[in-house]
């Protein structure tokens, strides 16, 4: 699987469609998911799975659109957007039941054709605009 295919599969199958079983193939056992760690989630593949589970649980009617993927040999950047309904607490905001949308830049560092590190930058429109940068979770 090429780096581009890996990012596309992660976003279109794992995030958009909830195919969590693919994480075992796509990510290293010791993958570091910065966003998951920022919120105190478990390490490794289980952390990446819990990140996706939490996102999908709190954003119903999820629709993901991949805007662009730029890949090198050991890193990939994916620009994607989403829409959905805010049904659970997310990004320190209580559920509103209202439509939400966001623009996301996902950065994947790869090793042996698997995700070694996952970093995310997110701009979401909830009850107000929210920006989250997993490399600076407290900023």
Image: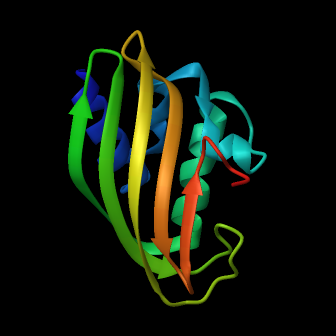
Residue 78 against residue 80 in the figure, above or below: above
Give residue 62's quadrant in the image.
bottom left
Residue 59 against residue 40 in the figure, above or below: below
Q: Residue drawn at (59%, 20%), measured in percent from left and top?
A: 29
* Residue 7: percent from left, percent from top: 32, 36
Give residue 47's quadrant in the image.
top right
Of 139 and 56, nearer the camera is 139
* Residue 94: percent from left, percent from top: 70, 81
* Residue 85: percent from left, percent from top: 47, 81
Q: Which residue lies furthest to the right in this view?
A: 40
Of 9 and 118, nearer the camera is 118
Q: Residue drawn at (44%, 24%), measured in percent from left and top?
A: 109
Q: In which quarter of the image is the N terminus?
A: top left
Residue 15 against residue 126 in the figure, above or below: above
Q: In this view, does 73 lie to the left or right of 119?
A: left
Q: Which colour scheme is used?
A: rainbow
Q: Which residue lies furthest to the front in this view?
A: 139
């Amino acid at each position: 699987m090429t780096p581009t295919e890996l990012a596309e599969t992660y976003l279109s199958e794992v995030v958009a469609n909830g195919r969590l079983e693919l994480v075992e193939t796509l990510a290293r056992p010791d993958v570091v998911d910065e966003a998951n760690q920022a919120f105190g989630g478990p390490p490794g593949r289980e952390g990446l799975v819990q990140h996706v589970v939490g996102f999908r649980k709190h954003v119903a009617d999820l629709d993901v659109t991949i805007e662009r993927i730029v890949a090198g040999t050991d890193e990939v950047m994916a620009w994607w957007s989403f829409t959905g309904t805010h049904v659970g607490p997310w990004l320190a905001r209580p559920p509103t039941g209202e439509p939400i949308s966001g623009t996301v830049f996902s950065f994947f560092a790869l090793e042996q054709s698997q995700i070694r590190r996952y970093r995310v930058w997110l701009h979401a429109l909830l009850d107000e605009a929210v920006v989250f940068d997993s490399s600076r979770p407290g900023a």
